[in-house]
Each structure stands twice: as C-alpha cells, then as structure tokens.
C-alpha cells in the first residue's frame, strides 16, 4: 500500500439503512490503485465489518490453490455438473490470461479485502451469488443459439490461449469480472446483462442487509460496475432480504414431461414401425441403419477427436443411438464416465489443471480436461447425428 493513500479518491457511495452505514467502495479488478484503496480503507479503523464481492466457491479457490485436487470428477459427471465445472474452469483460464497480459492478479483487491478483515479481526461476509447459480439462471434466459454460443465459448476458453480484447479489459476497469468474461461468450444480450449484473446488484444489497448483524459501519468492496445499482437497491428495496435472495435463487422447474425427448422417441420408433408397415423388414432395417450409423458414428467421432480411450469411443458409439431417447442420459455422460474410470485423474492432474487448460496440448494431456472434452464433444457430435439421422429417416419415409 502506498503511504497516506486516500481511499476516498476512488469511486464510493454511502447508504444508511436500519441504523447501519454502508460504505460501498467501487473497485476495478485489474487495478493496483483498487488494492491500495482497499488496504487503506481497512487500515483506517473506520469499519467494524467488511463485505466482499465473492461467493464461497471463489473465496475458497482464492485461498486454497489445492481445492481442485479434492474434487470427485466421477460425482461431478453423475450429478450432471460438468457444465458448471467447465464454466468455472473457463473463468479461471480467462483470469490466468489476464494476469499474464496485465501483470496483476484479477480480483487482487477482493483477496486483499478478505485478508485484511481477517488480519484485523473484523467480521467478513461473502455477498456475491454463487457463480454456478448465476450461470444457470443466465442459461435459462438465453435462446438455444445464445446457449450454444455460451457453451462453445466456454469450451474455446479451455482450448485457446487468446489475447484478451481491449474492450473486455475496459469492462474490467469499470469493475466486473463476470460481465467481462461472459461477454466473450455471448455479447449484446439483455438477458445475460440482467442476470450477470442487475440481479447481482439486488443480491448483494440483500446480502449486505442480511449479514450486517451488530455492525454499525460496513465496508463493501464491490466492482465499480455494481456501485450505483447496489446502492439503489440497498436504499430503496422494500422486500425483506430473505425474500429477495429466495427470488433470485429460483430456477425454472424442470418439466415433468420431457417433451422434446418424448417427441424424438415417438418420431424414431414410430418411423421404424411405419417403415415396417409400409415396406416390411427391409425398409425398417434401412431406417434403423440410418439412425444407428449416423448417431453412433458421429458420437464416436466426437469422442475420438476429444482424445478418448478406445473403450470410451466404443461406449460413445453404443450410447449415442440410445441416450437421445432417454431424458436423464446423455452419450457424453456415458463416455466421460468410462474415460474417468479408465484414465482416472491423478492428484497432479488437478494441481496442473489451471495451467494445462491454457493450451490445446495441455488440455489434451491433462486427464481432467480431457474428460471434459470427451463429455462436450461426444454430446455435440451425437446431437449432430440426431438431426442428420432424423432428416435422413424423414426423407426416406416421404420419398
């Protein structure tokens, strides 16, 4: 920290509510001045609690570099949490590129706030929403094309070590890591902005009120992009913190009837039956061959491109014609489970993961990231096979 650094020279706002004064300090996640401002504010002795724009998972990762090594990858696959895991890895890869490009650890001021509070014995509260929940709510509000862009962007971030664009860096200077990183994947989306920025303003304001306890002066360290919105919600919201947090935690209930899977099953099995009715066993066999060849072949090809084990490729070929007709299964899940069983990641793989995912060679070498590639590419190529197989069957039935 620079001597006599005036933290008030940085963007900040004050709000008083329910007998508590909240000082919101707006920071830029790639600024040394923001780190100095945070350290100076805590050192001033004015505050009896510190709140930080972090969730529990990011806080733990920031302070425990070995956290990934404790992960049960098989459990992640079985619970269908690979997309969330990949999103976190994509964010980590993005932060690593920023650190190398700018020479400062992104989010260093948040880490300084958490460490400073602990060092001075102040209450410290994590007030941001879990990044996985934010990702899920954002994904729910995007159309299928934007979800595809988001997913492909995350996959690309795990494979390609590209320079971070100047526009994204400017967004970081305005102060939000998630907005800058998500904008790489799905730009110009009001739904994405609302979920990633506006909802989190309301969430952090509610968390500040909820966690205040007996504090009388709380320092909240948040990205400058959240400053005005969080202050407004903090001052004006008439809802209780609990109701606000509950509302912003809701996910769309999954439909009890998997309509798309039901339609696909009826179409495929009905097509087989109709072919048999119209042309006998020869036509029915031809339709089955179309379906199996395209789905199994492309699913296996995706797994092969991902560098999967020969038995994982075989599992993808067997699963791909069947899993599209089952609402709870995916060919990528099957091939990834086989891959994880045959090439079980080691402790060293997890420790090296953040470095390995910054290059294509490293991503293929690391057993954890290769499992992710097997999952995503098997699913992607199986989906292509479903559309091509369905189109081929339809053409044959109508021809």
Image (cartoon, helix red, strand yellow):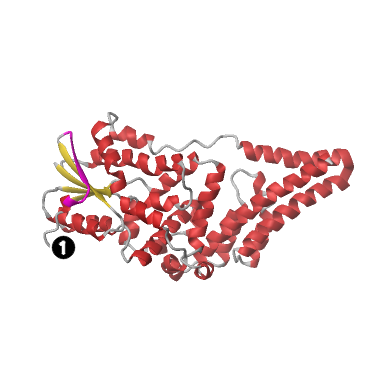
**Would you say the magenta stretch is mainly helix, strand or loop?**
strand
Q: Is residue 163 above or below residue 247?
A: below
Image x and y of residue 181, in percent: 41, 53
Q: Residue at x 27, y 43 (%)?
A: 227
Q: Secondary structure at mark 1?
A: loop
Res 24 quadrant in image? top left
Q: Position of residue 373 (x, y in %)?
A: 55, 60
The N terminus: image quadrant? bottom left
Q: Does residue 13 belong to the magenta stretch?
A: yes
**267 relative position to 179: left or right:** right
Q: Is residue 265 visible?
A: yes
Which residue lies at the image location 39% right of the left edge and 44% below the top edge? 196
**Residue 144 image-quadrant placement:** top right
Residue 99 x, y percent position in the rendering: 35, 64
Q: Is residue 373 above or below residue 129?
A: below
- Magenta span: 9-18
Q: For label 1, count other residues whose C-alpha is less than 10 Å away and answer few (under 14), some (14-19) or many (20+).
A: few
In depth, the one of 8 and 211 nearer the eye is 8
Residue 315 visible, this orientation: no
Question: Which residue does the image show at 48% across and 39% down from the upper left?
Answer: 141
Front one among 116 and 319: 116
Residue 336, percent from left and from top = 57, 59
Horizontal relation, residue 260 to residue 251: left or right: right
* Residue 383 is covered by the magenta coloring: no
Q: Is residue 120 left or right of residue 346?
A: left
Q: Residue at x 50, y 70 (%)?
A: 362
The residue where tag 1 is placed is: 2
Depicted 243 relative to depicted 333: above or below: above
Tell which residue pokes out farthest to the top in this image: 238
């Amino acid at each position: 920290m620079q001597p006599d650094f005036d933290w008030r020279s940085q963007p900040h706002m004050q709000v008083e509510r329910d007998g508590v004064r909240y000082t919101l300090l707006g920071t830029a996640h790639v600024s040394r001045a923001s780190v100095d401002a945070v350290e100076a504010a805590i050192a001033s002795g004015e505050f009896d609690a510190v709140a930080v724009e972090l969730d529990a998972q990011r806080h733990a990762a920031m302070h425990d570099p070995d956290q990934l090594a404790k992960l049960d990858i098989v459990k992640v696959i079985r619970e269908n949490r690979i997309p969330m895991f990949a999103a976190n890895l994509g964010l980590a890869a993005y932060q690593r590129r920023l650190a190398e490009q700018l020479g400062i650890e992104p989010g260093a001021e948040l880490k300084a706030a958490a460490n400073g509070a602990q060092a001075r014995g102040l209450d410290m509260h994590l007030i941001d929403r879990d990044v996985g929940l934010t990702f899920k709510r954002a994904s729910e509000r995007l159309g299928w094309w934007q979800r595809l862009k988001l997913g492909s962007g995350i996959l690309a971030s795990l494979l390609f070590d590209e320079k971070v664009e100047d526009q994204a860096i400017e967004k970081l200077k305005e102060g939000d890591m998630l907005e800058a990183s998500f904008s790489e994947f799905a730009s110009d989306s009001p739904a994405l902005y609302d979920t990633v920025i506006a909802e989190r303003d309301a969430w952090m304001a509610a968390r500040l009120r909820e966690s205040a306890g007996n504090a009388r002066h709380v320092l909240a360290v948040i990205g400058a992009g959240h400053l005005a919105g969080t202050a407004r919600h903090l001052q004006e919201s008439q809802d209780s913190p609990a109701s606000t947090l509950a509302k912003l935690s809701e996910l769309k209930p999954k439909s009890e009837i998997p309509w798309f899977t039901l339609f696909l099953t009826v179409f495929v099995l009905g097509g087989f039956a109709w072919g048999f009715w119209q042309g006998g066993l020869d036509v029915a066999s031809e339709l089955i061959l179309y379906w199996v060849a395209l789905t199994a072949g492309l699913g296996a090809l995706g797994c092969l491109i991902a560098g999967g084990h020969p038995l994982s490729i075989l599992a993808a070929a067997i699963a791909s014609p069947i899993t599209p007709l089952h609402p709870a299964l995916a060919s990528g899940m099957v091939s990834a489970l086989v891959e994880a069983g045959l090439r079980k990641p080691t402790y060293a793989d997890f420790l090296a993961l953040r470095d390995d995912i910054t290059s294509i060679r490293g991503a293929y070498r690391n057993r954890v990231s290769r499992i992710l590639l097997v999952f995503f590419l098997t699913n992607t190529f199986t989906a292509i096979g479903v559309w091509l197989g369905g189109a081929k069957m339809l053409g044959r039935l109508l021809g």
